Amino acid sequence: MRGKTKFFILLLSWQVVLIFSILFSVKTISAVAITTQTTSSIDVASILAISSAVAIGTSVLGSAIAIKTTGTAAISVLAERPEQFFKAFLVVALGEALAVYGLIVGILLWTKIP
């Protein structure tokens, strides 16, 4: 029981870290882009577009790795214990949430482009 509790606490804390990183990264990148616009000749739209692409690309890559790992484990658990479907589905869905977080950050950055 100790291992499961530790796993769920780590999973919950990782979700909180991701939410805070979304909130702070959009504000920081927007502030850097606005400062860059007033002080140098680098195009603000290009900085925000590249930041949006990186946010979406890395989150989707991380989500793919998480879903590959947890999906394989979920299928093996379901083969042995079909009543554990919800738990297996929940862990795979949390991996998919990583891609959604990256998409949200990408959309928020894209809307900041002047």
Image (spheres, helix red, strand yellow):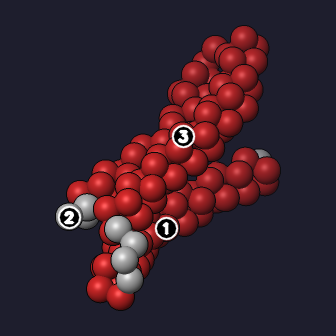
Amino acid tagged 1: Ser
In the picture of the structure, the residue carrying the numbered disc 3 is 60
Q: Is residue 97 left or right of residue 35?
A: right
Q: SS for tag 2?
A: loop
**Depicted 42 relative to depicted 3: above or below:** below
Residue 75 position by quadrant = top right
- Quick check: can you spot residue 42? yes
Residue at mark 1 to residue at mark 3: CA–CA distance:
16 Å
- The numbered mark, 2 or 1, whose residue comes first in the sequence reads 1
Q: Position of residue 97 (x, y in %)?
A: 48, 43
> Mark 2 or 1, which is nearer the eye?
2
Residue 73 position by quadrant = top right
User: Could you tell me which residue is drawn at 79 percent across and 50 percent down?
Assistant: 3
User: Could you tell me which residue is drawn at 49 percent across and 67 percent down?
Assistant: 21
Residue at mark 2 to residue at mark 3: CA–CA distance:
26 Å
In the picture of the structure, the residue carrying the numbered disc 1 is 21
In the picture of the structure, the residue carrying the numbered disc 2 is 114
Q: Are marks 2 and 3 in contact (CB under 8 Å)?
A: no
Q: Is residue 17 left or right of residue 28?
A: right
Q: SS for tag 3?
A: helix
Asked whether 8 or 2 is in front, the reply is 8
Q: Position of residue 81 (x, y in %)?
A: 70, 17
